[in-house]
Image: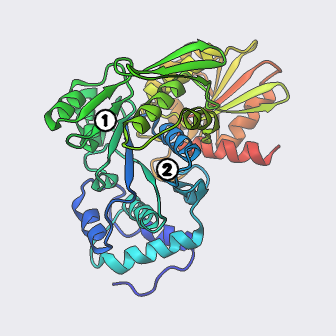
Amino acid sequence: MNTARPQTLADWLAYIEQQHPATIDMGLERVRTVATAMGLGQPAPHTIVVGGTNGKGSTVAFVEAIARAAGWKVGAYTSPHLLQYNERVRIDGEDASDAALVAAFNAIEDARGDTTLTYFEYGTLAALHLFAGAGLDLAVLEVGLGGRLDAVNIVDADVAIITTVDIDHADWLGEDREAIGVEKAGIIRGWKPVILGETDPPSSVLARAYLLGANAIRGGSDFFADVIDAQAWRWRDVGFRIELPMPSLRGPIQLRNAASAIAALRALDKPLSRAAIIDGVAQARIRGRVQAFERDGVEVLVDVGHNPQAARELATSLKVAPRSGRTLAVFAALQDKDAVGVVEALADRVDAWYLAGLDGARAQSATALQARLADTAAAGASTHASVEVALQQALATAKAGDRVLVFGSFHTAAQAVQWLEQAR
């Protein structure tokens, strides 16, 4: 065992990146072995696990906000982070401190022996370790990739949520919704509720639920989110209905995410007041999800969306909230994403494209991205070395009444949010 331990969080993050030869190594045996050695069991008396292709982070935010409005002590584990690693682990609404994370990584190192762990597996075990000592009422855990073989799946959830199922990470999860559905459905547990956010989930998800005797609670079938007007909506099922303010999180998909969060919390064996639901939906916040800024009459929207389904939802968001001027898009994507499908989903909503390069693993330059988009609406886009430069150019071109959309990955959104917040 390596006795020369890192000291700071930054040192630990650099260290854990190097402890496994692969960035992704699907499977539960290694992480379960270390969890057992650490004495980790259920992280809280009640646990909700959130999987799906898109909307996981927002759904976690709604669950967390509603539960905290009810007075519960909540731990939330999400990934990836936007600006700081600490964002991945929240306890009672606060990001974990550097010192707490360092202590958790030390505990993992004490227990793991010769077992290799990926970066994500270290992070998952650190979150579970911190939650175990926090005296939580509820833990909310976001799946990293897939579900069946994701490290989060060592925890048996009281309620599972599957937000959406669409094409992403095809090399790992499969090339169609049915195959991907098999992986997502791995978080379902026998005789426990599973909340399905989609009206028409893949049959593979439903088959898994029925095989296990899980109670599949389906959006658009067992519970509903009805728009009342621009300011209000209604959640309802057979025995309960409640009118709520529109979420501060923007976009029609956020009603689906909020509705799934409400359904999941109501499926727990724990009382939940109307006031907590109303207050929680209103208070839920998360950066980088159609996050709005304003610059001299130009609206800037920043979103982490990085696959065609997310892009279709973005297109719907732009449609329902039109601007008087043009929409300019700053787009930067990782090389393993379906950039063509993303552009096609937004082509009718964007008047001009600005392509930006990214750095790091799986990244690509703006010129490489441009070459991939040669036969799309973004074929004539300008190219820029970074998101910051592309955003500055788009803002220099934009006039009052225009809108600038910055999206394509968590890296894209992080760079945009950081620059926009610093340049106020």
Residue at the image point whose x is 57% and y is 73% from the top = 99
Query: Where is residue 367 shown, x and y percent of the image?
Result: 56, 36
Q: Is residue 346 left or right of residue 222?
A: right
In this picture the colour scheme is rainbow
Tell me which amino acid carries mark 1: Val
Residue 181, by quadrant, is top left
In the rendered image, the vertical position of residue 316 relative to residue 419, given as above or below: above
Q: Compared to 312, does 333 lie above or below?
A: below
Badge number at residue 80: 2
Please say if 167 is above or below 98.
above
Residue 392 as seen in the image, left or right of residue 156? right
| Residue at the (37%, 70%) spot, across then down | 19
Marks 2 and 1: which is nearer the front? Answer: 1
Say few, some or many: other residues with alpha carbon within 10 Å of mark 2 (under 14 / 14 to 19 / 20 or more).
some
Q: Does label 2 or label 1 sit earlier along the sequence?
A: 2
Of the residues shown, which amino acid type is indicated by label 2? Pro
Give the CA distance from mark 2 to mark 1.
Answer: 24 Å
The answer, for residue 236, to whether it is visible in the render is yes
Mark 2: which secondary structure?
loop
**Picture quarter containing residue 356?**
top right
As drawn, the residue found furthest toward the left would be 211
Q: Nearer the viewer, residue 340 or 208?
A: 208
